[in-house]
Image (cartoon, grey):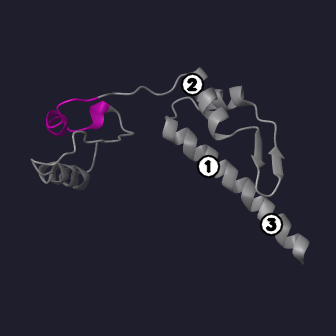
Amino acid sequence: MLTSRIETQFTLSIHYIPINCSMKIFHLRNHLWKQDIDSAMLRRIEKRVLIDLPTLKERQELFQYFLPSNMESKGCGLHLSCKINYSDLAQVSEGYSGSDIKLVCKEALMEKMRDVFKILENYEK
């Protein structure tokens, strides 16, 4: 269940949206299941769009998008290439949302960049 502090903040946020506000969409991203949201909060939201978790094929496509096997920097002529088994990544990521996969890919790229920086630091010494 959501903590009462989060519920209170959410309720206050909805109440303080001005009536004449041009905003037509209130975007609530929730990684929790619909059942975990308080029913009183759900009643305040007129329309809801529930998006399922990505399928195996969709997870594979997300990994291919966020972790391309070939990357090129046109400015400095740098070209990176790696072998990635996208189907294995899709298999082990069952239950991950699209934003979870994006975060995993970002962390993987950052970890590799840290390795590159360590090599460059040692090369300069």
Q: Is residue 21 above or below residue 63?
A: below
Secondary structure of the residue carrying tag 3 is: helix
Residue 46 is covered by the magenta coloring: yes
The amino acid type found where label 2 is placed reads Glu
Mark found first going from the N terminus, 3 or 1: 1
The amino acid type found where label 3 is placed reads Lys
Mark found first going from the N terminus, 3 or 2: 2
Instruction: Give the number of the disc on residue 58.
Output: 2
Quarter of the N terminus within the rendering: top left
Image coordinates of residue 74 in percent, x first then y, are 77, 51
Residue numbers of the magenta segment:
34-48
Image coordinates of residue 123 in percent, x first then y, are 90, 70
Which of the 4 image quadrants contains residue 70? top right
Mark found first going from the N terminus, 1 or 2: 2
116 vs 45, left or right, is right
| Of the pair 55 and 37, the residue shown nearer to us | 55
Q: Dot 2, how many residues are within 10 Å of its Cα: few (below 14), some (14-19), or many (20+)?
A: few
C-alpha gap between disc 3 and disc 1: 18 Å
C-alpha gap between disc 1 and disc 2: 18 Å
Image coordinates of residue 23 in percent, x first then y, are 22, 45
Instruction: Give the number of the disc on residue 106.
Output: 1
Q: Is residue 21 above or below residue 66?
A: below
The amino acid type found where label 1 is placed reads Lys
Q: Which residue is under mark 3? A: 118
